Every structure is written in C-alpha cells, then in structure tokens.
Image (cartoon, grey):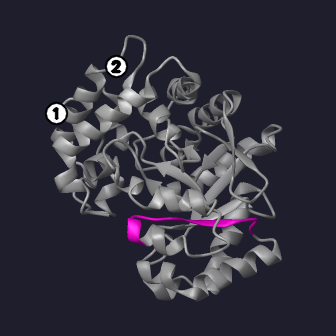
Amino acid sequence: MQQRPLSRTGREVSAIGLGTWQLGADWGDVSEDDARAVLAASADAGVTLFDTADVYGDGRSEQIIGAFLKSRDADDVTVATKMGRRADQVPENYVMENFRVWLDRSRRLLGTETLDLVQLHCPPSAVIDDDATWDALDQLVSEGVIAAYGASVETMDQALSALRRPNLTNLQIIFNPFRLKPLDEVLPLAAEKNVAVFARVPLASGLLSGTYARSTTFAENDHRSYNRNGEAFDKGETFSGVPFDEGVAAADELKASLPEGVGLPAATLAWIASREGITSVIPGARSTAQAQANAAAADLLEGGFDLDAFDALVHDVYDRRLRAEIHPQW
C-alpha cells in the first residue's frame, strides 16, 4: 500500500488508514476479539495509521489498540488519538490542566510514554482561534508527552484557522463525494503548508457502501439511529449531514456507473485518497472482511479504474442533488 509522509514528522502513514470509533461504541456492539481481529487484518494489509479518541467507548478503543500493539511488532503504526470531548464543550475546559489529565489517561490506555499524534477533538471555534491552545500543545511536545499535534474540525472556517498555526501536523475533516467543500480552499492550503489531511466519514456512515435502502434500519445504540438530526453531536458526523433518503438515491446513482468488479466503497476510498492534499482516508470497520476490503481499495490507486471519470460523476451528482443543501453548511 502507498505510504505517505506525515507532514514534517519523519513518519509515514498509509493512504488508507483505519478509523476505530466502531471498536469503541456508537455503532452497535463489537466484541473485543472482533476488534483485535480488525486491527490485525488492517495491519497485515499494510495499514499504518490507526485513528482513535479518548471518548470512543470511554477509552475502550484506545485500550484495545494499546493491547494489540503490545502483542506484536508494530513500530510502523502511527496512532492518532484525540482529546477534548471528555468535558463540556466550553472554551474554559481546553486548558493545560485538563490536557495533562486527558493525555495521561490516553498514554496509560495506549501503553506509551509519548503519544504519536494528538488531535483536538472538534472543539469550539474559540479554542482553535486562541493562541493559548497552541502554546500549551507546543509545551507538551517539548516535554515529550506528545510527538505531534493536529486538529479534527467540523467546519472549513475552523480548518482555515487551524492552518495558520506553524506547528500543526494534521487536520482531520469530513470529506467524501457528499461533502466537497474542502476542495475549495482547505485542501489546497493544507498542501501548500505541508499539513497532512485525514479524511474521516469517507463512506458517509455507510451510505457510500451502496448497500442501504430507504427501509434500512439501525440499532437503537447506533448513532445512525439517534443522531440523524444532531440530537447528540453535530449531525454532519452522521451520514455526512445528508438526508438519508437522498443519500441512498445519490449512492445508487454513483454505484450504477461503476465497471464490473469495482464496488462503490472501494471506488469512493480510492477517489478520496487520490485527491491532492489528502494524506490518508480513515474508514472504520466492524469485521475483518470490511477491514480487508477497505485496505484493498488502495490497489485502485495503481491503475485499472478510471478515477477521472468517477471524479466527473461525483461532481455531477453532488451539484445536482446535494450542493444547495450541503455546501453552505460546515
């Protein structure tokens, strides 16, 4: 699998990474054995980026990753965790005292003295705009608590604000065929500044799997049931903010265009990974089959699939079906 520079860190990460929200909670139940199997299948397929957060399963995701990495030689795996969602979302909580508490917990769960990469976890805009936030992160780097830092953001204005920071290693944003706004400013500027970009929610919470129908239902403890309108957190994290029925129709249109042997998830992941400015795509997986299929999408980057033709269709479908509602948001 393609390995790409992680900004100025000297590390490289795979073009297709692994998002591990599913291994914590909020996607139905995943056993610990199944979670470890997903990590193993991903690593065996060349995945060298695991993205997690301290709130995924209240630390369960970090703990499982830590135990997995301890059990095998995985020095090439970069673990990108996040902090900030363990407290009320007010700027006053994003201070050094809390950073130390949150990061000490993550270090313990992941079993490491220095965290590879820590991202602010979709904080309020005032936190991103505040010099004190970044001064604290610089201090934590100098102390060896973290090796690098970045920001996971909800809006493109937040992304542009974070990109003003000289020591920013990465941005994490929602980017997929149903969310094209990052192409306007954020991705070009990130590339110019040598800031890595991780694309989260790449399959729009499964809409771009091409397997859902309007009648599809989800478990009660699955955010695709309880957060469609932003009841628990920003609705853009669920189906990329796209109304479910419209998303199903748009996905069906994309799927119908594909040549035999190329599935919509693979085409989508390869298309995202091929966009200038994207460092890694971080789909989640609940099974080894999903993990292997996600990683295999990287093969399409080497040829055999017309990414330019798919790009043209992505823009056409977005412009006709989604732009008017989605583009002004986030």
- Residue 299 quadrant: top right
Tell me which residue sits at (55%, 60%) in the image. Answer: 190
Amino acid residing under circle 2: Leu
Place of residue 127 in the rendered image (x, y in percent of width and height, measured from the top left): 49, 81
Label 1: how many Cα within 10 Å (few below 14, some 14–19, many 20+) = few
Per the rendered image, the range of residues in magenta is 146-157
Q: Using the image, tell me which numbered label, if any, was put on residue 43.
A: none
Q: Is residue 256 at least partly visible in the picture?
A: yes
**Residue 153 among magenta residues:** yes
What residue lies at 80% left-to-right and 77% top-to-bottom? Answer: 142
Q: Nearer the viewer, mark 1 or mark 2?
A: 2
Q: Which residue is mark 1?
A: 214
Image coordinates for residue 306, horizontal then vertical, percent: 43, 23
Q: Secondary structure at mark 2?
A: loop
Please name the residue that numbered disc 2 is placed on: 258
Say above or below: 144 vs 215.
Answer: below
Residue 329, percent across and down? 26, 63
Is any atom of residue 55 visible in this view? no
Whether the magenta-drawn stretch holds residue 204 is answered as: no
Q: Quadrant of residue 38?
A: top right
